[in-house]
């Protein structure tokens, strides 16, 4: 993973961790369900954006390097990720 992608992903993960702690606190304080759900939806979107960032970095670096080396396993890994993402 390149340095910029790593820094961005770590920042996003810190945000997600903080958001999760906030949701836990909302549950503990018996907050209104709709308000809690709005926050969980925001967390889900943040996770999806983080995944997209990681995948983009993987495609632009690891996959290209693997193909240049003649490593076809990277294509199998992409197919596996596709299957996991669509379950």
Image: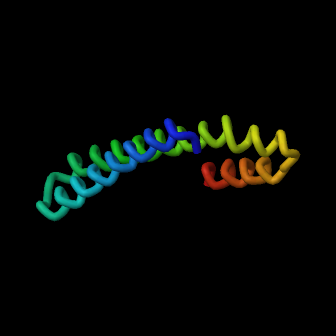
Which residue is most to the left?
A: 29
Which residue is most to the bottom?
A: 28
In the rendered image, the quadrant that contains the C terminus is bottom right
Closest to the observer, 19 or 84? 19
In the rendered image, the quadrant that contains the N terminus is top right
Closest to the observer, 57 or 78? 57
Q: Position of residue 77 (x, y in %)?
A: 73, 53
| 81 lies above or below 2 | below
Q: Residue at x 13, y 60 (%)?
A: 30
Q: Position of residue 80 (x, y in %)?
A: 71, 54
Asked if residue 7 lies left or right of residue 19, the reply is: right
Q: Position of residue 24 (x, y in %)?
A: 23, 60
Asked if residue 17 lies left or right of residue 23, the reply is: right
Colour convention: rainbow
Q: Position of residue 85 (x, y in %)?
A: 61, 50
- Looking at the image, how many numbered discs can be counted on the residues? 0
Asked if residue 10 lies left or right of residue 61, the reply is: left
Q: Residue at x 69, y 44 (%)?
A: 62
Q: Residue at x 24, y 51 (%)?
A: 36
Q: Residue at x 11, y 61 (%)?
A: 29
Which residue is most to the right?
A: 70
Asked if residue 17 lies left or right of residue 10, the reply is: left
- Using the rendered view, name the quadrant where residue 9 is placed: top left
């Amino acid at each position: 993973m390149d340095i910029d992608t790593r820094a961005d992903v770590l920042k996003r993960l810190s945000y997600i961790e903080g958001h999760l702690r906030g949701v836990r606190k909302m549950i503990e304080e018996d907050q209104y369900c709709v308000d809690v759900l709005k926050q969980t939806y925001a967390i889900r979107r943040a996770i999806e954006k983080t995944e997209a960032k990681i995948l983009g970095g993987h495609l632009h670096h690891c996959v290209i390097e693997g193909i240049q080396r003649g490593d076809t396993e990277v294509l199998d890994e992409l197919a596996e990720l596709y299957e996991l993402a669509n379950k």
